Amino acid sequence: MRINSQITIKWRDNGKGGWPGGVNPPGSTPPGVAHEIEFKRDKLGIPAKLTSGKIRFTYLGDDKWRIKFFPAETPGTR
């Protein structure tokens, strides 16, 4: 998988309420304020091409994110 040089996260923040009734009606737009933020892939330490591994995005609130890259373990490195 190739990873673009810019990673864009888009989300809607509607507080603690979530979807009314906890259901996402088909074709609907989530309630709340739209947000968008961009990160440079190389500043996050994420390679341009991945064959395995994990990227974890954690929203911390107030438009702040924690992004961690976990490369795949290679055999015999544990």
Image: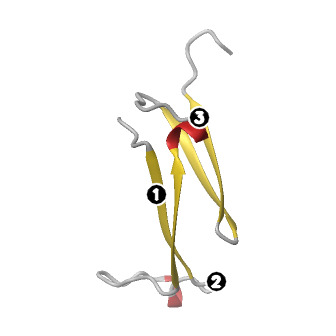
Residue 76 on image: x %, y %: 61, 9
Q: Kindly report the distance in space between the C-alpha atoms of the residues bearing marks 3 and 1.
A: 15 Å
Dividing the picture into quadrants, the one containing residue 1 is top left
| Of residues 42 and 1, the one drawn nearer to the viewer in this rendering | 42
> Is label 3 in a helix, a strand or a loop?
loop
- What amino acid is labelled 1 in the image? Thr
Residue 14 on image: x %, y %: 58, 84
Q: Earlier in the sequence, mark 3 or mark 2?
A: 2
| Of residues 17 and 69, the one drawn nearer to the viewer in this rendering | 69
Q: Which mark is residue 15?
A: 2
What residue is drawn where x is 54% and y is 51%? 39
Q: Kindly report the distance in space between the C-alpha atoms of the residues bearing marks 3 and 2.
A: 31 Å
What residue is drawn where x is 45% and y is 48%? 6
Residue 40 on image: x %, y %: 52, 46
What residue is shown with label 1? 8
Q: Earlier in the sequence, mark 1 or mark 2?
A: 1
